[in-house]
Image (tube, rainbow, N blue to C red):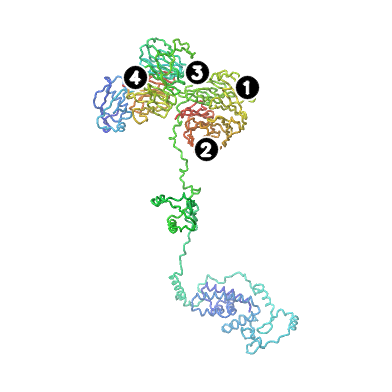
Amino acid sequence: MNGEGEDASKVIHVKFLTKLDYPFKVPVTSVVIPSSVTRLGLSSIVNSLLTLEKPEPFDFLIDGELIRMSLEQFLNAKGISAERTLEIEYIRAVAPRKEEKPSLHDDWVSAVDGSSPRFVLTGCYDGLGRIWSSPGSCTHILEGHTGAISSIAFANSEGAEGVTVATASKDRTLRLFKVDPAESGDSTTRVGAYKILCGHKASVASVAAQKYGSKVCSGSWDCTINVWDTNESTSELSVPGKKRKGNNQAEEPQLEGEAETTLVGHTQCVSSVVWPEHDVIYSCSWDHSVRRWDVETGKDSLNLYSGKALNTVDVGGEGSALVAAGGSDPILRVWDPRKPGTSAPVFQFASHSSWISACKWHTSSWFHLLSASYDGKIMLWDLRTAWPLSIIETHKDKVLCADWWKGDSVVSGGADSNLRISSGISIS
Amino acid sequence: MTKKKSEAANEDQTRDTKKKSVSAVKSSQKEKPVLAKQVKSSKEEEDLLLDSATDSDYDGDSLSGSLNSDDFDSDVFDSEDDASQKETEGGDKDSSEDELELHGNEDSDDDDEGEQVDSENDEEDGSDEEREVAEESDSSEDEVAPRNTVGDVPLEWYKDEKHIGYDITGKKITKKEKQDKLDSFLANMDDSKNWRKIYDEYNDEEVELTKEESKLIRRMLKGEAPHADFDPYAPYVDWFKWDDAIHPLSSAPEPKRRFIPSKWEAKKVVKYVRAIRKGLIKFDKPEEEPNVYLLWGDDSASDQKSKHLTYIPPPKLKLPGHEESYNPSLEYIPTEEEKAAYELMYEEDRPKFIPKRFTSLRSIPAYENALKESFDRCLDLYLCPRVRKKRVGAHSIINIDPESLKPKLPSRKDLRPYPNSCYLEYKGHTGAVTSVSPDCSGQWIASGSADGSVRIWEVETGRCLKVWQFKEAVKCVAWNPLPDFPILAVAIGQDLVILNTELGTDEEQQKIEELLRLGTLPEQDEAVAAIVSWLPDETYGGIKIKHFKNISYVDWHPRGDYLSAVMSAGETRGVVIHQLSMHKTQRLPIKMRGLPVCTLFHPTHRGMFIIATKKNVRVFNLQKRELAIKKLETGLREISSMAIHPGGDNLIVGSKEGKMCWFDMDLSSKPYKTLKNHPKDITNVAFHRSYPLFASCSEDSTAYVFHGKVYSDLNENPLIVPLEILRGHSTSSNRGVLDCKFHPRQPWLFTAGADSVIKLYCH
């Protein structure tokens, strides 16, 4: 910190405010600081005011914008007068504080799901799905696929008799697994599918489950989105391993499900689907479009054109209405479909250097989202600034999938065959 | 009278005048003797002066009448000024010339005349007589006075008289009686000296010439000087000593005219002044225009420079039509309503000519507007004269903005999307990747490498899905174009291997397995059997078709059943077509010239087959078994590759000298455009299936992407715009990018490098 009295004109009166609780609350008094301080300087000022044992990084907001330059530059850029007392809100910096032990897989980790706080699901190129209760401890192995798993999702994470997991694979099928979390012991249990969903003519690229429902949808390379029922008690016949000789060792009878609905409209591979609401499916495709489907009618009610082949889409943010998508270029785009008459993205984040393989909104925060890229980086974004909040560079190769877990961790899998968990991200 | 003297006199007189002019001493007749006496001290000078004295005398006597009164006149003119004297001197010279003529012409009259004139002189300057006689005593002849004193009268006057004149005493000189001619002739014949005798008519006597005289005459006839001892070329000796002559030669007092202003000059000045005042004399010469011009000047202004009018032809008028006939058909005649409508129109809009009908030529009235129109025409000519249009020619090319000559190409931004940056790499091969082929869905891509492996990659992630290892380097891979038939054709050495990728659904797999099972092979032609044999492939369960030469290129028919294999070394048997469903091979029904390089099945026309040899491209129709339908003249040294537009009418050909030719096959057999971009060999060229893009890749480790739009309108030529140079591959063992293929659905380009990496360039 600079001496205070060196230039009176470059001194600003500030007041630090926060919504944080006791240990991070500073007394509400006006402080005089030089205008040349940056976030780091402000953070050390607050730390010195708090007299914490362990220094804590903070991020600072003025009028809802994160400070990413010196205070003077920021005020000049925003046209805020430096005469009156400035109110600066501070939050704990969004950055992983702890890197968990990597969980090694046999092959590339292609899919990860962290929507349940109890487990992490991973799909792997060896055709197996895995359930991890904690870093390094795999409780269940979901087997049966003859091709690489491309996507994995909890179909019903709160079920009474166990959780239901849906996997999508490049062998053109989806499989449904029932896992009883209670039976997990020290050894890993191998679980076979109770239902095989056949109907796609090409590799299945993505699967998403209905929240509080019994349906899953899947996007495939045959340009269609299929909606499937996960219920066991359907009238469909049990055809145990009739065609599939490789699956004969599965003891329990296997059901073969057929698609309830097929949503046709995309002209190229449907690379990602999400099912955020009861009967609304969002999908993105290599035909450069993001579409919103109405499950009941089977029509697409929204069509956003991005100009690039898209790999991943997610819906979240303010009112769970913002659409974030990334694909065959290093730019993560965020659309607001509520804005009438425009299909231009409202935010564009362009710090990556290669294709974006995954993007996920934070489940509780309206501002935060993550993106994973083939350049081996995971970036955490805040809509309030164009710079990434933090960059996780733990992977040594392409990152193929990433998700939030428990609200404060990022789980990711990549071409280095590891599942990595970065925890301790404080998002208020 | 001797010519010698007159000659000498001439000469001396000129010398004399010179002296006069130099020493500014006026030579007058009277002064000469005085002068002679003064300068007698020196011998040479004496001679000279004697000469000069004599000369003036002979001057006088040789000249007749007023002309020889030179010296005398000079006295008279003394009171006048110098100019007049000069004039007389000029006249003097003239007269001497006359004298010369006189001497040359008449020989016989010479003596008499001279004597006569002498006598006259005597009379005139009596005082000089004595001195002259004394001094010129050397000539005996001159002493004898002429007998006849009658003077210079025609002797005809005395023709009928008995006398011929009067002697000095006034007595008649009677004529001698005439001799008989015969006698005189005889007398002459007797007398040996007769040839020297001359009859003097004037004195009526015979004169006998002396020897000297006859010699003199002879010399004169020859044109020499009369005196034998006269040397006309004697060196000039300037006897006068100029250096110590402080005093004038003459001690005579300066004449008065030296002091007073010259009247004559004043007159002359007045005359000149008047002439100047009148403007008759001009001092300033008119300035001449410089006779130079700008050689490299702008020629365009030369029209204005040329003085004469250049003819500018009038614009051609339209020939009169039927409606202008005196009796046009009825349909040309406007109705009354139409005429009324014309009246309502503005004058500019009104038709210039309204057809009318007359029954006969006789009834046509005079043209009422004739006068007005000729007046208008004059006005037109006055106000807007014809102007010669300046043509945009070679000489005025300097005035053209060079920017305007550039073709109007659309901006690259407007031609998006096109591949421009590399995000994904497919790594795993250990040798140069020689060939890539994406499957028709765009999910997978197959590659063949020099390390003998064939790999299938997932396009999306760059993961290698499958590897087949062979013993020899893979030359070419080609994915079957049918989406439900995921099989690969791989050229390895002499073998063409059909590989099952096992990517299809179960039903598809069944079909493929069935197809790839070689049952009983059908009977092959003997000629075919000699070069090709179908075998099962033990290692990977496909089909191996063994050829007699190394295969360099494989291409599938768009329907996926036929595939062609090219053996460069096979020459006329270098191209064979395999039919997969029948397990049969056909040779080309056409005889082929040159070494085949690559082949193409036409994308839309079923039977069309395109073969590129090293120099040319030929299009065949396989069904008709004819000679080539078309032959494209590339003008290239060595063709390396070609690709056809999905529309089927446009073809690009890459060559080993780095040139790429675009052929519009409907347009011409010559290239529509030749692009020279690569400094090294082009290894492959490719068209995109749906986007208007094409690309070329080269040994210089770059790939070029072009916009190549083909319009459905046949009148519009294809638009070719270079878009991007894709770099990134490194050169390995002097080879660069070996293959390039477009993604079937996205505007992405795959490039296979000799650095064993496949790159995907995205938009």
> How many residues crowd mark 2 within 10 Å: few (<14), some (14–19), many (20+)?
some
Callouts 1 and 2 on one subunit: yes
**Mark nearer the viewer, 1 or 2:** 1
Mark 1 vs 4: CB contact within 8 A? no
Asked whether, in this view, residue A9 is left or right of residue A281, the answer is: left
Spatial CA span between label 1 and label 4: 71 Å
What is the three-letter code of the residue carrying label 2?
Answer: Lys
Callouts 3 and 1 on one subunit: yes
**What chain does badge 1 belong to?**
B
Where does label 3 land, which residue? B506
Spatial CA span between label 2 and label 3: 48 Å
Spatial CA span between label 1 and label 2: 47 Å
Q: Which mark is residue B523?
A: 1
Is residue A290 at all visible to an observer of this figure? yes
> How many residues crowd mark 1 within 10 Å: few (<14), some (14–19), many (20+)?
few
Image label count: 4
- Quadrant in the picture for residue B44: bottom right
User: Which quarter of the rendering shows the C terminus of chain B?
Assistant: top left
**Mark nearer the viewer, 4 or 3:** 3
Q: Which mark is residue B673?
A: 2
Q: Residue at x 44, y 72 (%)?
A: B274
Mark 4 vs 3: CB contact within 8 A? no
Q: Position of residue B605 (x, y in %)?
A: 54, 31
Give the mark nearer the N terminus: 3 vs 1. Answer: 3
What is the three-letter code of the residue carrying label 3?
Answer: Asp
Spatial CA span between label 3 and label 1: 32 Å
Mark 1 vs 2: CB contact within 8 A? no
Residue at disc 1, secondary structure: loop
